[in-house]
Image (cartoon, grey):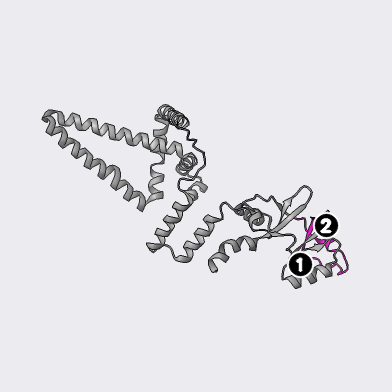
Amino acid sequence: VRSHFDRGSRRAKILEDFLRDREKLLTTTLLGTNLCNVSASVMAVRLGEPWGAWGEAVAGGIVFVLLLLFGEFLPKVMFRRHPTRLALMFAYPIWWSFVLFKPVIVVVTALARGLLVLLGIHAASGNPMVTREELKLLIRRGELAGTLTSKERELVHAVIDTRGKRVRDIMLSMEKAEWLPADATIDQACRRCKESGRSRVPLVERVQGGFTVVGVFNLYDILFGLDHTSGTDLALTVARPPRFLAPDTTLSMAMQRLRSGRQPIALIGNETDRSAMGLITVEDLLRVLVGRVEA
């Protein structure tokens, strides 16, 4: 659906709108389902009236079988086999149903929310439709069915488990990280990169027991781009501005920012005063997922 949405499909845009507000989708479909069930029951009674009680019972049984077959079994089988195509096909009917029954939907939704408040239940918007453990169970079933390998299952589990983690949970503290004083020369910086095996090293000023990062030395700038520099020059003269991330940044957001900035290292701290408590790299982010699977 998202690929159709990116291509500008109007049907996909309707589905995307419903998926953003799943309460609206659920209310619309439940209202339509109940209207069909009630209408079918009324028709069964009317059709069976000429034959008395037995006629009503037979008509009710026929309607029950038809509802079970055409209202439950067949739709579920068809949507499991062709979910995207059928979802796009029914986008407009669902949208028109919502427009037609919007007054009823608004009233029913308000009554339901009011009832939840009276019962002391507060529905939080944005909650997942399934819990983390339920999703893991579904993945486990997929592995048992042969659609996922054990490695794939572990990788997906790792992704699920890292959703609640922040960069402060996996960062390397500045006390343990490789860094250079701000007055280090280019030769010293290159030598430290060679010894540590890292191509980028933060340049730091120690202030009252803390760490103030003034730049990030990039070895590749010396190897491929800045031939006119001297080894006795300060590394700060060729350093790049540091990229900072707040400690509560999620891992997915951190990866996105590092990729967009084309800088595989970020300092964890306050960008305003450039104080850092730790650092994180793209390699660290990948190790949380891939490293766990390879282990």
Disc 2: which residue: 206
Relative to 255, 175 lies left or right: right
**Residue 265 visible (yes or no):** no
- Residue type at numbered disc 1: Leu
Q: Secondary structure at mark 2?
A: strand
228 and 112: which is toward the camera: 112
Check the image and report above or below for 130 versus 104: below
Say which of 255 and 112 sits in front.
Answer: 112
Instruction: Residue 221: say if magenta.
Output: yes
Residue 24: image quadrant is: top left
* Above or below 40: residue 260: below
In the rendered image, residue 55, in percent from the top left (x then y), is placed at 13, 33
Q: Is residue 117 left or right of residue 241?
A: left
**Residue type at numbered disc 2:** Arg
Q: Kindly identify the residue that appears in the image at 36 percent across and 51 percent down.
A: 80
Q: Is residue 103 left or right of residue 36?
A: right
- Dot 1: what SS? helix
- Range shown magenta: 213-242
Q: Which residue is mark 1?
A: 219
Q: Position of residue 221 (x, y in %)?
A: 77, 65
Task: Please count the marks in the image.
Answer: 2
Measured as percent of width and height from the top left, residue 278 is found at: 72, 57
Q: Is residue 128 above or below residue 291?
A: above
